[in-house]
Image (cartoon, helix red, strand yellow):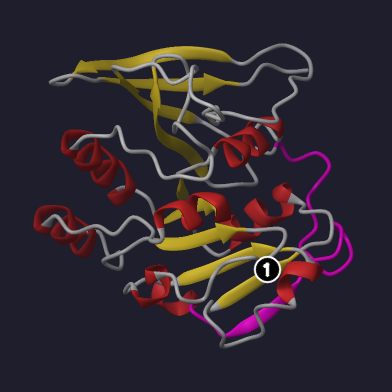
Amino acid sequence: MQQSLTLSSLTLFGSIGEVGPRFPRDCPLKVARPHLVAIFAQSLDGKIAADRRQRPSFTSPEDYHHLEIQAARQQAVIMGAATLRAYGTSLRIKDPELLHQRVVQGLPPQPLTIICSASGHIPRDLPFFRQPLTRWLWTTPTGAQAWPPGSGFEEVWVAPNWDLPARLLRLKTLGIERVGILGGGRLLGAFLQAQALDELWVTLAPLLLSGCPDPPASIEGWQRLGSPPRLQLLECRQGSGELFLHYQIDWQDP
């Protein structure tokens, strides 16, 4: 399916009802978007790295395989530009069995990779741009100036006020039904703010990072409105040193 979506174009979103798709007032966000799964690892005290300018160094090969399994189930994955700058690459599925399963399901070998960056500040020499992936960028008019058509991303989606519901609605209309959110913390906070997450896969690593100079939290910028969501534990698996927790998120009516 996604092979048909790799168009070289600059798509301009205004606010909903201008250039972008109309978001029906009587249509619940859950119906008008893909199924969204956050997949991330954190320390026991809720941090994802010792320093926000560095990539996490505490995850294990076991956790990476878990991440690969969960990402292989998605049609697209979304990650923030800060996470991309820290790692230099996006997740790439390499396991032959997982690749075979995607082919059997009629999916391309790799999920569509969507990078979120309001500023558009993404170094062009990152190994990310040499990975065999389909790359999209979600940005603002300012950020889009650095990425004209054909300069690294197959599609650039622009919205002056970010407009996450409109972006998710458009993914849904393109036939993208399952999306993984890979972080970082500000991106996860934005999706929680929009009540646009359905599942959490959290890896708890056996260490504490709060004593480090500037450790980023696994979720940042979320200001709860109304009742908190209910979390239902679906699975708890013990690894060699980590815990793998799977939760369903049930958003209550405001």
Q: What stretch is highlighted in magenta?
A: 6-28
Q: Is residue 197 above or below residue 102?
A: above
Left/right of residue 150 with respect to residue 45 in the rendered view: right
Secondary structure at numbered mark 1 = strand
Q: Is residue 139 above or below residue 41?
A: below
Q: In which quarter of the image is the C terminus?
A: top right
Could you classify mark 1 by the number of other residues whose Cα lies within 10 Å: few (under 14), some (14-19), or many (20 or more)?
many
Q: Identify the image quadrant of residue 200.
A: top left
Place of residue 93 in the rendered image (x, y in percent of width and height, measured from the top left): 24, 57
Name the residue at 46% across, 76% down.
125
Q: Identify the image quadrant of residue 136.
A: bottom right
Is residue 247 rendered magenta in the image? no
Identity of the amino acid at label 1?
Trp
Name the residue at 50% across, 42% down.
183
Name the residue at 53% across, 39% down.
52
Residue on which the image places disc 1? 157
Q: In this view, does 179 lie above or below 120?
A: above
Q: In which quarter of the image is the N terminus?
A: bottom left
Left/right of residue 199 with respect to residue 159 in the rendered view: left
